[in-house]
Image (cartoon, coloured by chain):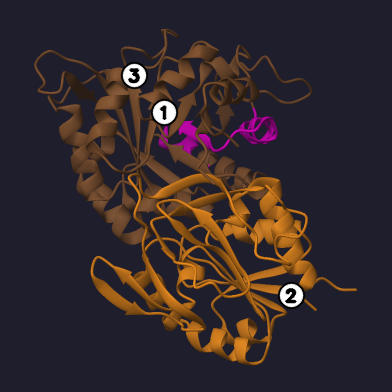
Amino acid sequence: MSSPRVVVLDYGSGNLRSAERALACVGADVTVTADSAAAVDCDGLVVPGVGAFAACMDGVRRVGGDVVVRRRVAAGRPVLGICVGMQVLYDTGNEHGVTSEGIGVLDGTVERLDAPVLPHMGWNTVEPANGSALFAGLDDAWFYFVHSYAARPAGGDGETVAEHGGTFVAAVERGPLSATQFHPEKSGDAGLALLRNWVGSLS
Amino acid sequence: MTVAVRVIPCLDVDAGRVTKGVRFLDNIDVGDPVELARAYDAEGADELVFYDITASSESRDTTYDVVRRTAEQVFIPLTVGGGVRTVDDVDRLLRAGADKVSLNTAAVERPDLLAEGAHRFGSQCMVLSVDARRADWSPSGFEVTTHGGRRTPQLDLLEWVVRGQELGAGEIVVNSMDADGTRDGYDVAMTAAVRAVVTVPVVASGGAGSLGDFAPAVAAGADAVLAASVFHFGELRIAEVKTALRAAGYVVR
């Protein structure tokens, strides 16, 4: 069986090398590109992201990533958002009183956490969603977070939660859509195991 | 579900090689930062810091190569500092695979560098590292030094870290030049003073010498503890430090 073809969407956001290498390490055939044809065609699309919601969303739009993600989700084809790449999957993001539109394949708004120390930076545990495929075999695992914003749980299926200044969505699994607020590519062996679960689910 | 206190080893890298001896690790090239990074990762390090002390600009390309090779093999956060002067330097380090870049002297000389970096890459990757010491003249009792402690720009520590956070630093490393190298413990008063005026994570640095030194720094408000020589010389293991922190009631990974 050949390796699943994974595209890491390159729209000018941060360190993509770690995501590329971590995905390759767990058996994916990885391409880092802004090419929307490749992003539509691959077995799994990874939307990375660091920094600000609005800036990431601008970058995603510039390479047509919003259209690609919507098309893939409508067609039931896997997408994995990471960190701000997860946040932009939601309807909207609020930063410094400014609301920006996201890709809108998840319902809800991304808002600033209410905690004495922000960013929420470091390793934390999560409470995996019932029957989670991403977290299979990963009870009590630690993951690396760096963020000041997150979505609040809507109580739907497939929501994995964590705590920092209240409960927030640490990961989401909804049909073809998966996303993590933490950085699996920076979360050591646990992160690699999670990526292996995702890559293993691709056909 | 509480964020864990981070234990962070710092490696000095000169022209692509680790300069201080490492005694605790068998069967590895102790001068190779990539191998050391792997070993520290295996020991439970929560992040890694490379501090580039390369003097000549021609040799600085080796730093990028080291960062690149490390990021390809070690899947925990990597911060790189030392000699970062421009936003393009930050860009090159992030592209090579660094997750965070730390600014020290260059930020004091040109504070807008922090703002420019934060604007372009996000606050989460801009670390303000401050070498500070006690000084009677300054309002807080602590002053900033630059150039590895050789110069004193007459800048109050607390004034500077508040400004640094405003400019876009997403984390602040407080390195005590008084405590550095003494192994008498962190300057917890300095850590607490910084913690009281900023809301971004604070990393205590300088002075760690024994297992009992780490919990007081966390009690003073540090979100992470950084050390170099005690780890390099094998006097303390990362797992032991975590055990000591856990025994003191703190959450560690």
Sequence-first tag of 3 and 1 = 1
Q: Is residue A144 above or below residue B144?
A: below
Tell me which residue sits at (61%, 11%) in the image: B235
Q: What crowding class fits label 1: few (fewer than 14 Cα within 10 Å), some (14-19), or many (20 or more)?
A: few
Three-letter code, disc 2: Arg
Chain B drawn in what color?
A: brown
Q: Which residue is mark 1?
A: B55
Q: Is residue A180 visible?
A: no
Quarter assignment of residue B82: top left
Residue at the right extreme, as displayed: A1
Q: Is residue A118 above or below residue B175?
A: below
**At numbered mark 3, what does the secondary structure look like: helix, strand or loop?**
helix
Q: Colour of chain A?
A: orange
In the depicted structure, whether residue B200 falls above or below residue A92: above
Where does residue B64 sit, x and y in percent of width and height?
A: 52, 44
Q: What amino acid type is highlighted by mark number 3?
A: Val
* Disc 2 element: strand
Marks 3 and 1, Cα distance to the nearest angstrom? 32 Å
- Let me know if residue A75 is in the magenta part: no
Circles 3 and 2 in contact, beta carbons < 8 Å:
no
Q: Nearer the viewer, mark 2 or mark 1?
A: 2
